Amino acid sequence: MKRRILSLPIITVLSFTFLFLSSLTTNLAAQDKLGWVGPVYTELSQSLTKGFTSYYKKKYGRSVDITFIRPGGWPVCLDKVRAWGNKPDADIFLGAGAPAHELLKQEGRIVPYKPKDWDKVPADWHGMKVKDAGHLWTCFAPWIVTNLYNQKVLKKLRLPAPKTWDDLLNPIYRGSVVHTLPYASGTMHEAVEILLQSRGEKEGWKYLRLLAAQLDRFSTGSTDTTHITSRGEVPIGMAQPQMNAMVARRDGYPVSDLLPDQTILVPEAVALLKNAPNEKVGKIFLDWLFSMDGQKHVLQGGYFAARNDISFAKWEKEGVTMASHAKKALGADSFWSLDVGFIEYDLELAAKRWDEVNRFYEYEIYRKWGKLKSSLYLIEEVEEEIRVAKSQKMSVGKAEKKIKEARKLFEYDGDYAAARLAAAKARALLVSP
Amino acid sequence: MSRGNLFLAGLLWIVIAILVIYPLSFLVIESFKISGSDNFGISNYIEFFKDAYYLKTFANTLALSAAVLITTTIFGVPLAYILARYRQRGKTILTALTLLPIVLPAFAGVFAFIIFFGKYGTLNLVLMEIGLIEKPVNFIYGFHGLVFIQSLHMLPFIVLSLSAGFTNIDPSFEEAAEVEGASGFWRFITVSLPLCAPTYLAGGVIVFLWPFTDWLTPLILGQVDFLPSVAYINIAYHFTDLHRKYMGIVAVVVSSVVCIFLFLLARRWVEKRKYTGLSKGTTSEGRIIEPGPVMKIWAYIYMIFIAVLVLLIPIVLGLSSFSRRWVFEPLPTYWTLDNYRVILTETPLLIKNSFLFSGVALAFGVIFGLPAAYIIVRTKVPGKNALDFIITLMLAFPGMAVGVSYLLAFWENIPLATHWIIMPLALFARRLPYFLRMAHSSYLQLDISLEEASEVSGAGKIRTFMSISLPLLLKGVLVGVVMFFIMAFQEISTAIFLYRGGWETMPIGIYLNWHRGMEFGIAAAMAFLMIVITFVLLLIISRVSGNVLRAAWGSDNK
């Protein structure tokens, strides 16, 4: 009896080991391979894997083994490609917007390839580039930088949905906003760029400082933001890819897109990596991706399709389940018929300074977040005291001047300690001018 | 001294040199590199200790460690006392439940608690429904949540070490105190607790070190200003920014040094202060008390309270693994098998990888661990204590340190990291002490005269080992084998740095599905599957060893 008990687990463990050892080796035999690296969501990668493997099998009579590496948001993916140097571990850079691909282009990490239906993707839209004229990268899934909010929770808190960027600074939303750091997410980085480019650097950073004081906390990535907002932990999630709301709604979460007044297009693009180990299969994949079949799998994977000759209504009839969700989310029959307010976006500037912007945000806002908040809260308290004093017809001239100085120190200089000190002085001046 | 033993020890030392000393020295060297030049220097360390942000994370980590230690102690003392002293029905099962977190992956608990304690999770919804609260309460996002989750995960270590202490106290000490007129409570404070101090410290140090190694829980809760999380972000998010990478490595080295220093300090202190009663004839069970009815009820309530908290993890994960979306409702309303379909049909690779890597690591562990235990217990080979010491030290090393150092060391000169064998090798190095300690203690219990008799009768050393020692060691070794396998199976801190496309294990799959995709259900299904596998393995050890306490502890309470 004892012996049987003893031998059972050993046999189990060992047999499992051998079983898996042997199955691993057989799997590696004679198969075409394809490697992707990029920040796209699992759902898209799964849909594309499914679509492409069955297409490949049908067309070439062979199976293709796809590996997908997604170490993080696009900055992290880009870093991964850089770390590989001249021997990339993947063939295709799948996903990320123009800034990422412009960087890949500048660093010479991608090579041109013109997929078969390349002409079906518009060259630009509302002044924003959708594909590279030299065939280095092409958009396969366009979207717009939006914000996300949880209708159920906002209703519970009796708050209206914020419509513009400036609405988000309204004190009623304090503690109800969440976003991540620009280094962790390309979308957040894009949101920061939108604010910097539309308002100018000085006003842009001022806005970001004030917004940081509204945050409940920082999330660790833009998917994390989607989660937190969908689950209602924090009702407003900033810097979200437009299709996240569509997918979350399909899954039953009470969330909605919040198209801000100023935004940009992110032409989620694809490119062939230089020295790709499976270049041939990579090119077949690119051709397929822009075919009608490929584009349908893009939509089924929760992203909007990029071709300009498609209609969601038609696809709906053909049984593409996501088409009805897309139609509802966009309120249009194809992505390109959307009506939005774009800013004038300087892609070159964005590509050039992306590291610098990330760093500045992290060091000047994120790392000083505690000081930032306590400084701003004090300024606001003193401002309120001055307002009350003024309404009681007291002389507040000196204090008012000092508190304005405090605000300037906070908003434009980002010197939170000095701003706090100035606010304290203003309060003292209020008591004994 | 036989030449064979020396040869064997030499082999073991070579393995240690290649798999432990070589990579870890790489880590230290890297931390002294100055970015933008080929020079070395201590400037990274100076920057680290001058930078207000890094100092803050260091202070935060210390505060968290202290808070976790205090919380586990407050909750652990009564629990350990009940477990060690009271005679109660159903104690075994309650004990097993309270100790379960030791073998559960730490991140599984976080996911479960997010679902249950989240702002629109079950508890808040129920409280709002019955009108106790107006607005949802933030139970877990923040420092307090971290303390709660980490404390629950580490509670078993305190309970085990304290209850071992209570059991070992010679009853005559306490009886003497009672004869002298000390009341129950006073006797407990002045006699029982101080006598437990050494064993408490052994568990306490492991608890205290946990916040210095756990990067994932703070990351999931969005509280990243802690040393290991900052190190992870610096290394994993900024790996081409060399300076950031070096600073991350400095953070890893600093936490490793803190861990090792405290670990050694505690070890020394414990060895110096081991209390030994002079009396003979104490029962091995220690003193057993038949509690009064009121105490008995309180003891039950308390044990059940802890057990329920622990049970929440598998229950919540189990429920959400059969549902796609579970929020804004106390229990899931949409049921599906889709999550399991996905993990079993579309990504069986992860399950395969987990078994493969842990299995191969286990094979390495046994091949290395048995001779190592033999050398340490049975021979007088010079340097055997150092061997024991280094292997035990791996207990204190943060997993991240192992992962990063392997990546650095086995990339260019010895390009092991391009082959999947690096995964089991790293798991093997990281989890080695678990197997060794079991093999070690079984060797100690094996009477040497049996082996001597065999050798006298003419059997060689190897034959003696195969036909005498091994069968007798088997029970203890088997517990070690299963423990090793469980611990390797749930490893993530090391593996996350080493995996490449196609090498993902289940813990990595859980992390990626949750953190990088919207697939909470799939992550929950994987976590639940892991818990089931772990549970089955635990069941096997408890059948074999007959002692759940020891099985979960995985060593001899040294």
Image: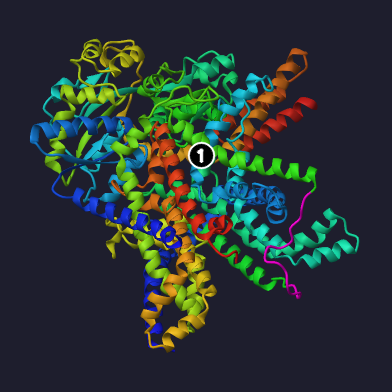
User: Is A276 positioned to the left or the right of B38 in the image?
Assistant: left
Q: Position of residue B442 (x, y in %)?
A: 51, 70
* Chain letter belonging to callout 1: B
What kind of colouring is applied to the model shown?
rainbow
- The span shown in magenta is B277-291
Q: Amino acid at mark 1?
A: Pro
Q: Quadrant of residue A249?
A: top left
Circle 1 sits in a helix, a strand or a loop, which is it?
helix
Q: Residue at x 51, y 67 (%)?
A: B437
Residue, far right = B181
Q: Residue at x 17, y 45 (%)?
A: A276
Say which of A14 and B491 sits in front. A14
Q: Residue at x 39, y 82 (%)?
A: B461
Say which of B177 and A206 sits in front. B177
- Residue A133 is at least partly visible in this image: no
Q: Residue at x 57, y 35 (%)?
A: B141
User: Is B80 positioned to the left or the right of A170 in the image?
Assistant: right
| Rendered-image quadrant of the C terminus of chain A | top right
Q: Position of residue A317 (x, y in %)?
A: 22, 11
Magenta stretch, overall SS: loop
Q: Which residue is mark 1?
A: B314
User: Is A61 positioned to the left or the right of B233 in the image?
Assistant: left
Q: Position of residue A304 (x, y in %)?
A: 28, 21
